[in-house]
């Protein structure tokens, strides 16, 4: 998944220490569920996505799934859950084991658009 035109945009909702441990899914925007202004930043990501779905990814799909459920219950659309997460779950092997690209937290934060920081 990358943030290229015509594809889904991704938000990486794990914590900064987790990003440091495993890296961040390449092409995703690191917007931690555990930091201030999460909701504001998440909706700014949806605006920036220009109609493309915004995928949510965490470690194993638990946190991203909870965020998805909350968004659906509140009537919001335009979001997807990467239920395998970075590390894998019952839904599948996960981003890392699937061989998808990962970048360092520093690279991911450097690429984060200003309105999402």
Image (cartoon, rainbow, N blue to C red):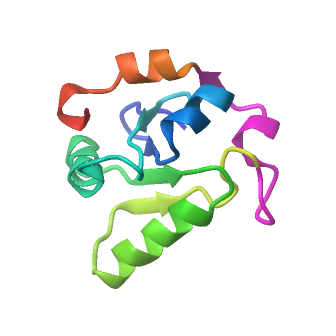
38 or 11, nearer to the observer: 38
Magenta region, mostly helix, strand or loop?
loop
Place of residue 100 in the rendered image (x, y in percent of width and height, measured from the top left): 70, 32
Name the residue at 76% across, 64% down: 91
Query: Is residue 98 in the magenta section?
Result: yes
User: Which segment did they paint magenta?
Assistant: 88-103
Where does the C terminus fall, quadrant-wise?
A: top left
In the drawing, does residue 9 fall left or right of residue 98? left
In the image, residue 49 above or below residue 108? below
Name the residue at 60% across, 37% down: 18
Place of residue 88 in the rendered image (x, y in percent of width and height, measured from the top left): 77, 52
In the image, residue 19 above or below residue 79? above
108 or 6, nearer to the observer: 108
* Residue furthest out toward the bottom: 73
The picture quadrant where one finds residue 63 is: bottom right
Place of residue 78 in the rendered image (x, y in percent of width and height, measured from the top left): 34, 62
Place of residue 16 in the rendered image (x, y in percent of width and height, measured from the top left): 49, 35
The picture quadrant where one finds residue 83 is: bottom right
In the image, residue 115 above or below residue 60? above
């Amino acid at each position: 998944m990358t943030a290229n035109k015509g594809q889904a945009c991704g938000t990486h909702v794990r914590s900064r220490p987790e990003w440091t441990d495993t890296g961040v899914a390449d092409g995703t925007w690191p917007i931690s569920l555990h930091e201030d202004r999460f909701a504001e930043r998440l909706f700014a990501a949806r605006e920036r996505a220009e109609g493309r779905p915004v995928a949510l990814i965490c470690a194993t799909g638990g946190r991203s799934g909870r965020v998805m459920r909350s968004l659906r219950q509140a009537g919001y659309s335009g979001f997807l859950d990467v239920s395998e997460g970075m590390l894998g779950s019952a839904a599948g092997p996960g981003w890392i084991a699937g061989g998808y690209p990962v970048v360092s937290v520093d690279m991911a934060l450097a690429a984060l658009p200003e309105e999402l920081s």
